[in-house]
Image (tube, grey):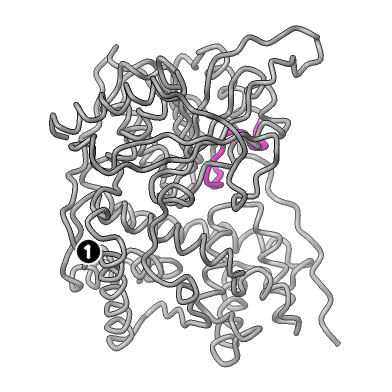
Amino acid sequence: PGPAEALGTAVAARRAAAAGVDFGRCPQAEELPDGIRCGTVTVPLDYAHPDGKQVRLTVSRVRATHRDPDGGGREVPGQGALLYNPGGPGASGLYFPLVGMVPEWKRIAAAYDLVGYAPRGVAPSAPLSCQDPGDFFKGPRPAPTRPSDAYKKERAAEAEAYARDCAERGGEALRHYHSLNNARDLEVVRAALGERRLTFMGASYGTYLGALYAELFPSHVRRMVFDAVVNPDPEQVWYRNNLDQSEAFEDRWDDFKEWVAEHDAVYGLGDTARRVQDSYEEASERLAAEPAGGTVGPAQLQGAFLTAGYYDDYWPHRAEALSAYLKGDPQPLVDQAGTRTAEGAVRSENSNAVYTAVECNDAPWPADFEVWDRDNTRLARRAPFETWDNVWTNLPCAYWQGPRQRPLDVRTAPGELPPTLVLAAERDAATPYEGALELRRRLAGSVLVTERDAGTHGIAGGPNDCVNGHLEAYLLDGRLPARDTSCAPRPEPEPRQTAAPKA
């Protein structure tokens, strides 16, 4: 980062501190409950030119309750704002303040104002778009694990066209949507909230954002929680991180199949992981011949089951849908994997546009498809479930127009940054565990809490009391374990009875 951007950030932060945030009603399109209040924070599009074009970020907040969650009647002292980023890139944090209603968050909600925001590019914060939302969901589609040369050529042409459309729609502004600017935006939001130092929680991509903030503004950090950690090694961002992710999803796919096999009496999909795989492949072949509901083909099936690799909570629902489909009832599968509503398509297209812009702008990517083909053909031999789908998602970066940022080498020396808390599930596929170990090595004074033999993506504030105990001790009292520690895994999900087949 150059001195012009550093100066521009300081200028924007001073302005934001003077202006504050005028909280009022939230944008109607966001459909947030009345208890949440919203405002905007103005940031420069280009921090090297802080007097140039501006972007208005929408911020949401619920004030600390100050109520004793144990019913003791004492007033809980406030600790300022806890600002949250849910990841993506491309996800909105505007709904984050709602977690204060969840029992696991009551203690934190008593002490902190819960603050979320929509990052630049994410609606309603100067939303990006790369294509007509009606064209974003193309279903049904195939999902070959050994794609032919002709299919690869077709998807490469689509990726090149998507990158071209992003450039045409985004114009000169597109180059300014990247993680370094997201970190600078976070600094301006901190100032606008009147916080002398930042208390921040980031999940998934939000951990990379937090790591960049810690590198750029270490003296402005109060407390930081990194949950489900992206590997911040500059050599990993982003191409190699995606290769590692594809490999890790194969292990999670195996976890899911083994769980389904354990409950064969409920689902009838096979009593071994291999037989469950056979049931999945049978469904994929049937959908290739006749899409369910006219919209669910093999790619939609794969996309629905990919979410089971993120969250254990989906396991019973996905197994139920697959079982019902093979028994003659496609409706549960259509409900879970079918075409989104028009409103949902708009949000998803926007989210994908931001994801693509940020990751493509953040770092160099291989510009030769032969590199992608070589690396992923090799990988797909041992990890077929997600490898090629991940390629098609990220391939526009091979054809991206405009300059690329150079990833920061995030490293803090002892005493440079306050102690931070790193949370990770040992079998997380979306952000493989090595990322948490790498961040732990790079942030002096950080402590890692691991949920052993578990793979849900994001573990803070969930059903694991041990994890939540460490989270509360840190956020409420600033206490961390003396050394890296671990928690037993959360209970496995309970199976659900399958739907009866249609007559």
Q: How many marks?
A: 1
Q: Quadrant of residue 186?
A: top left
Q: Tell me the residue that label 1 is attached to.
A: 400
Say whether residue 14 is left or right of residue 448. left
Please check the rendered image and state whether residue 149 is part of the magenta-colored stretch, yes or no: no
Q: Position of residue 285 (x, y in %)?
A: 55, 86
Start-end of magenta stretch: 453-464
- Magenta: main secondary structure equals loop
Task: Identify which residue is drawn at 29% across, 23% down.
Answer: 217
Three-letter code, disc 1:
Trp
Residue pictured at 69% horizontal, 30% vertical: 104
- Which type of secondary structure does the marked residue at label 1 adopt? loop
Residue at point 40%, 37% (across, down): 207
Is 461 included in the stretch rendered in magenta? yes
Quarter of the image that includes the N terminus? top left
From the viewer's perspective, is 95 left or right of 7?
A: right
Question: Considering depth in this image, is 144 or 175 the residue closer to the camera?
Answer: 175
Displayed quadrant of residue 248: bottom left
Q: Is residue 79 above or below residue 164?
A: above
For image coordinates 42% across by 21% down, the residue present is: 198
Q: Is residue 239 visible?
A: no
Q: Quadrant of residue 268?
A: bottom right
* Nearer-the-camera pick, 270 or 172: 172
Q: Residues within 10 Å of mark 1 (few under 14, many from 20)?
A: many
Is residue 36 found left or right of 349 in the rendered image?
right
Asked whether residue 203 appears in the rendered view, the answer is yes
Position of residue 259 measured from the top left corner of the image (x, y, whole percent): 65, 58
Residue 45 sits above or below residue 422 on the image: below
User: Residue 344's spot in the image, x, y percent?
Assistant: 57, 64
**72, 454: nearer the viewer:** 72
